[in-house]
Image (tube, rainbow, N blue to C red):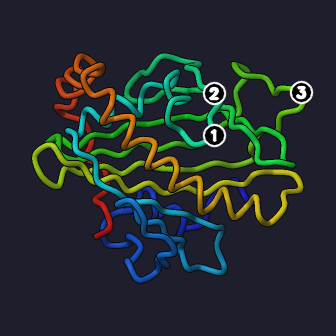
């Protein structure tokens, strides 16, 4: 998979409303437990998955959980290690993540640059994730470094204390990977990630009160994120 994404995939994450992907391009294949999972219908482009749900919490409570790298092992699908490599600065940070492989595939890891953008109104946000190279986390023997990862959590308050989560990702696992493992990564892992995030927010919301308040206070004057596809 090329590192430079084509216009269609790039539009999924950072596009203006005029070029956002229309809803009919998404093909739903799972609806369970209040979560809808679909795939992008675009044979010419790389595989892109999408998982959507709603969480009974405030926007900044969800953001606080997403920004807590060390505790991602508690909810992120198959995550066995997660740590900060740099402190957040201007909404941007580097972190390291290792994911347990699905037999017979080895573990995968990545250095991820995250960027948080919050709407000035405080009712929407985007957390963009992209794999990068960094000397802060050298490659580990026996673990495959992901050649490419790009993802985004698009959040919008749909009612007081209720947030819609629209998670999209595109990943190249690298190496020789059986088809059933690729399907698991593209279909099951997005579902498990969103379900895990929802459960984590609901059970830890009181633990993140200070972080959520800090994010709320810092949101003033932030750049607006692209709107969610309807």
Q: Position of residue 209 (x, y in %)?
A: 23, 20
Q: Compute the Cα span from label 1 to label 2.
A: 14 Å
Quarter of the C terminus within the rendering:
bottom left
Dot 2 alpha-carbon crowd within 10 angstroms: few under 14, some 14 to 19, many 20 or more = many
The residue tagged with tag 1: helix, strand or loop? loop
In the image: residue 220, left or right of residue 135: left
Q: Of the residues under marks 1 and 2, which one precedes in the sequence?
A: 1
Q: Of the residues under marks 3 and 1, which one precedes in the sequence?
A: 1
Q: Position of residue 174 (x, y in %)?
A: 81, 51
Q: Nearer the viewer, mark 1 or mark 2?
A: 1
Q: Compute the Cα span from label 3 to label 1.
A: 19 Å
Q: Position of residue 155 (x, y in %)?
A: 30, 49
Residue beneath label 1, please? 78
Mark 1 and 2 residues: CB-CB less than 8 Å, in contact? Answer: no
Of 179 and 86, which appears nearest the observer? 179
In the image: residue 93, left or right of residue 137: left
Residue drawn at (46%, 63%) of the image = 12
The residue tagged with tag 3: helix, strand or loop? loop
Residue beneath label 3, please? 141
Q: Compute the Cα span from label 3 to label 2.
A: 15 Å
The residue tagged with tag 2: helix, strand or loop? strand
Residue drawn at (29%, 22%) of the image = 208
Q: Position of residue 157 (x, y in %)?
A: 19, 50
122 in relation to 53, above or below: above
Quarter of the N terminus within the rendering:
bottom right
Of 22 and 191, which appears nearest the observer? 191
75 in relation to 174, above or below: above
Residue beneath label 2, please? 96
Dot 1 alpha-carbon crowd within 10 angstroms: few under 14, some 14 to 19, many 20 or more = some
Q: Of the residues under marks 3 and 2, which one precedes in the sequence?
A: 2
Mark 3 and 2 residues: CB-CB less than 8 Å, in contact? Answer: no
Residue drawn at (41%, 73%) of the image = 21
């Amino acid at each position: 998979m090329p590192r430079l994404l084509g216009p269609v995939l790039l539009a999924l994450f950072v596009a203006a409303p005029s070029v956002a992907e229309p809803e009919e391009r998404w093909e739903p294949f799972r609806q369970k437990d209040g979560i809808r999972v679909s795939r992008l219908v675009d044979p010419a482009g790389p595989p892109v998955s999408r998982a959507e749900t709603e969480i009974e919490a405030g926007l900044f409570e969800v953001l606080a959980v997403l920004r807590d790298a060390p505790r991602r092992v508690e909810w992120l699908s198959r995550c066995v290690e997660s740590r900060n490599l740099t402190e957040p600065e201007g909404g941007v940070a580097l972190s390291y993540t290792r994911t347990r492989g699905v037999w017979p595939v080895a573990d995968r890891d990545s250095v991820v640059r995250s960027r948080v953008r919050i709407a000035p109104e405080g009712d929407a946000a985007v957390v963009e994730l992209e794999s990068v190279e960094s000397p802060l986390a050298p490659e580990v023997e026996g673990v495959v470094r992901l050649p490419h990862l790009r993802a985004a959590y698009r959040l919008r308050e749909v009612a007081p204390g209720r947030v819609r989560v629209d998670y999209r990702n595109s990943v190249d696992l690298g190496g020789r990977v059986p088809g059933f493992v690729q399907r698991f990564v593209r279909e099951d892992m997005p579902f498990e990630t969103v379900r895990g995030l929802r459960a984590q927010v609901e059970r830890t919301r009181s633990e993140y009160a200070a972080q959520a308040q800090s994010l709320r206070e810092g949101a003033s004057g932030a750049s607006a994120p692209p709107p969610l596809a309807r």
